[in-house]
Amino acid sequence: MVDYRNIQKFLQSRIKRRNLMIGAGAFTGLAIASQFPHQQAIAKGRFSDYPFKLGVASGEPYDTSVVIWTRLAPEPLNGGGMPPVNVPIRWEVATDPSMKRIISRGTVLATPELAHSVRVVVEGLSPHTWYWYRFNVGSEASPIGRTRTAPAPGSFANQLKFALASCQHYEQGYYTAYKYMAEDDLDLVIHVGDYIYEGGITTNVNSPRRHNGTEIFTLEDYRNRHALYKTDENLQAAHAAFPWIVTWDDHEVENNYANFISQVDTEPDQDPVIFLQRRAFAYQAYYEHMPLRPFSRPVGPDMQLYRRLNYGNLATFHVLDTRQYRTDQPCGDGARQRCAENLSPEATITGKAQEDWLYDGLDKSTARWNVLAQQVIFSQRNTRAGGLDTYSMDIWDGYVASRDRLLRFFEQRQPSNPVVLAGDVHSNWAMDLKANFDEPESAIVGSEFVCTSISSGGNGSDTSATVQGYLPFNPHIKFYNGQRGYVRCNVTPTSWRTDYLVMSNVTTPSGTISNRASFVVDNGIPGIRQVV
Ligand code: FE
Ligand code: CA
């Protein structure tokens, strides 16, 4: 066990050093003798540089409200570059892209406690309507963002088109997929995690980009890392184009963490007390940089991320958090043979409270499509190797009893059209959910679509000899592809269509995108079928 005092000292010294840098070096051009001159200077709109370098975002679309977001960060990679004072930001929402017909406006205070990030819950909007929004501070204006509310409760929208994305390692590829996504015809975007990666600078000379420092541990570290990722103009374009619904996976904190348990490694955070401090920093920075509702604001190391969003009667998104409440990976994090812990009913990937909340919501749902928007592969995936059945312990395969309870629920309670979405594995998959994956004749009880990474893993390739080798042991898996890109879902009252859009490459900024495959599910008839 690592010495607790050492890590505390380590973390504190890093924080002190960063604070010093922000106080002394970052605010060129402004008087820094006292707080008062800052406020005067900022009232006149003088920043050390353009303050909206991280762009704008919106999210959490309800029928009459949506969250709009920005952060003042004239020096994004150096703590933001703002003085430690509150700064009022004006916001406005319009019904036209040139912001002439303003229907709502106000002022919100950017505070140092939230790294001068702001979120406004814009209320009183019309259902199923496009809006445009902008922030102003001093004489500086943000880019204009566009957002859209959900249809009214009980109403049947004819169509919902959304993109599914995950895993955007900054170093391993360009976000060109987001450029295409921003130009796509969509209502919203769902991101299912690995929005940032926590590691240091790669030594791989073939990686097209570099992280901004060593592995991140402190609040300042996590803020600067989020800021680095948010400086990407393609990512900003996708945020500005649509409202997003986000949930996290592991890398927003640390690879393969489980609740308060750090990944087994040599880092000085193996003590759960220390790891929870790190988690608190990571959750705080995540909240500051995502267009989440205020109820998600973290309290210490805890953050309310699982939640439900309705898209009229057409779809309900049950957004899950399979990291914060899970028991430790049974028998280790990697690919393993089944073990007793792995099958134990005590092993849980959601925690009891979230599991009960999910059943309750599925039972009460009046939606045609019940979407589980979550992080890691749900279906069984036997990566059989060396003649032995093998499973990843970091995904639902590691928590067999959790999954079996949910599959039994699907079979017995029959919520309308369950569709599971996942990411994490840096590859595309499509599969039928089976009442019992080990019995090919058992009932199909839903569908799962797994999206590949935006950039993680570099260019990838269409097929894999390893995957081809074990697919025969997984007859419910209908599709695999190992390129980068995003998944587009087109949902109507009568059918669900999923398109797998893949990038020619991500190691140059000029990759092109094409539709690799499409699958359809018909309302009321479980089972996916390939149409392209
Ligand atoms: Fe990832
Ligand atoms: Ca992951």
Image (cartoon, rainbow, N blue to C red):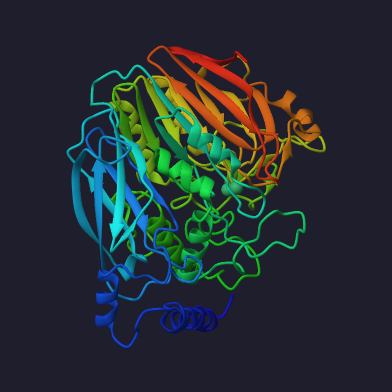
Identify the residue shown where x is 42% and y is 59%. 283
Q: Residue at x 23, y 26 (%)?
A: 153
Q: Is residue 21 above or below residue 165?
A: below
* Residue 279 located left or right of residue 152: right
Query: Residue shown at 29%/18% (left/top)?
Result: 156
Q: Quadrant of the N terminus?
A: bottom right
Residue 267 seen by the camera? yes
Q: Position of residue 169 (x, y in %)?
A: 61, 51
Is 277 in front, or is 337? 277
**Image-based side of 129 in relation to 248, left or right:** left
Q: Nearer the viewer, residue 320 or 105?
A: 105
Q: Residue at x 27, y 26 (%)?
A: 151
Residue farthest along the bottom direction in this orientation: 33
Q: Nearer the viewer, residue 279 or 380?
A: 279
- The quadrant in which residue 204 appears is bottom right
Number of labels in the image equals: 0
Residue 495, horizontal then vertical, whole percent = 45, 14
271 left or right, relative to 505: left
Residue 271 percent coordinates (x, y): 53, 71
Image quarter hosting the C terminus: top right
